[in-house]
Amino acid sequence: MSNESGRAVDAVIAPRSRSEVGAAVTHQKQLTFRAVDEAAPGEKWRSLFELHWPAFERWYLSETERERPSYLACLNALSKHMPELVPTYRWLCELSGGRDLPSRMLSLYRPPPYITGCSQAVMATGQTNVLVRNYDYPPELCEGTILSTCWNGRRVIAMSDCLWGVLDGMNEGGLAISLAFGGRKTVGDGFGAPIILRYILEFCGTTEEAARVLARVPTHMAYNITVSDARGHYVTAMIGPDREASIKRIPMATNHQKKIEWYAHALASETLIRERQLAILLEDEETTEERLISSFFSPPLFRSDYRRGLGTIYTAVYHPLEGRVHYCWPGHSMELSFDHFEEGSVNILYTSRPDVMEQG
């Protein structure tokens, strides 16, 4: 892959859709969110694969197939950098039919570039311990699956991406994590961040352990990863394919790394405005957990620019000490926990502002 991908630039104006490659995001889109509980990969995961694979196949081949690594290269990369994850990977490959192309895609090694928005913040004080995030993205590109699993002896609840990767999630040890695009056009040799987040939730129990993974596992694009644990320890890691990870005790992230490097995206996503809003909230001693959470439902953190793929798709609120999470939309939320995970679905219609259409 080149280090300056023009395709990534195009995504700001007309994001590539997994459901209809090359189509612009429409003014109105309905997305179904499903909460799925399956401790070990089985028929439920296979059904999700069959539902989403046609769209993921088009996305994975949206560039020429020669741009994608071979199965052997994918397996070798996983074995080198995240070996503990290989048995689960092989299991999912078998469930997907043992075919070459799905197996390569599931590795998330050197996938096509993709761009997100996102705001995320941690509040960890003597009174509260919470990770809050807004996921800003085209509805067409959001899988909408909330998975409750126990694949490697540790229970995990996470918003899924690419069928087993993680956009944000938490494990039963109280480790919570969230990703945001890092606002840089560089593309290189590494993994999509969702598979790195899955690896962390499966095998890490503390923020320090997660930080070590983020420092050593290569990523194919720039991401800002915010991590918090049950002890209230937190970091934000600014990672990319062309430089060492910067991992600091910073409680928030939007869509740039230290300074603005991609001005068009920074302007379109309002990354500096959102960062300033979070800084004001977190620096104010009067800010409560409720005030922080409510701020994610209003501008500038909540965004309705769905036409350009920069609208807020959902808000997630993770409580590491209590093992529970709220996934929220204006007018509705799903509360899930390790003690009580109820399967179900909700349909969200995204227009100028998302509205709940019906609850399944």
Image: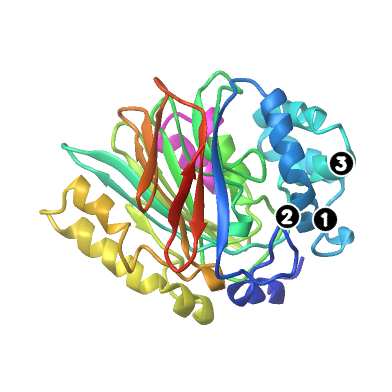
> Is residue 67 in view?
yes
Please count the marks in the image. Answer: 3
Residue marked by disc 2: 111
**Which residue is depicted at the point 14% across and 58% down?**
284
Extreme residue toward the front, this view: 358
Q: Are marks 3 and 1 in contact (CB under 8 Å)?
A: no
Looking at marks 3 and 2 on the same chain, the residue that comes earlier in the sequence is marked by 3
The residue stretch that appears in magenta: 201-215
Task: Check disc 1 and give the amino acid type.
Answer: Arg
**Which residue is depicted at the point 69% across and 66% down?**
16
Residue 42 % position (x, y) = 70, 22
* SS class, disc 3: helix
In magenta stretch: residue 67: no
Residue marked by disc 3: 72
Q: CA distance from mark 2 to mark 1?
A: 7 Å
Extreme residue toward the left, this view: 286
Task: Check disc 2 and give the amino acid type.
Answer: Pro
**Which residue is depicted at the point 74% across and 62% down?**
20
Residue 191 % position (x, y) = 67, 50
- Please state if 168 lies on the left or on the right of 290 as rendered: right
Residue marked by disc 1: 68
Residue 260 % position (x, y) = 46, 76
Q: Residues within 10 Å of mark 1 (few under 14, many from 20)?
A: many
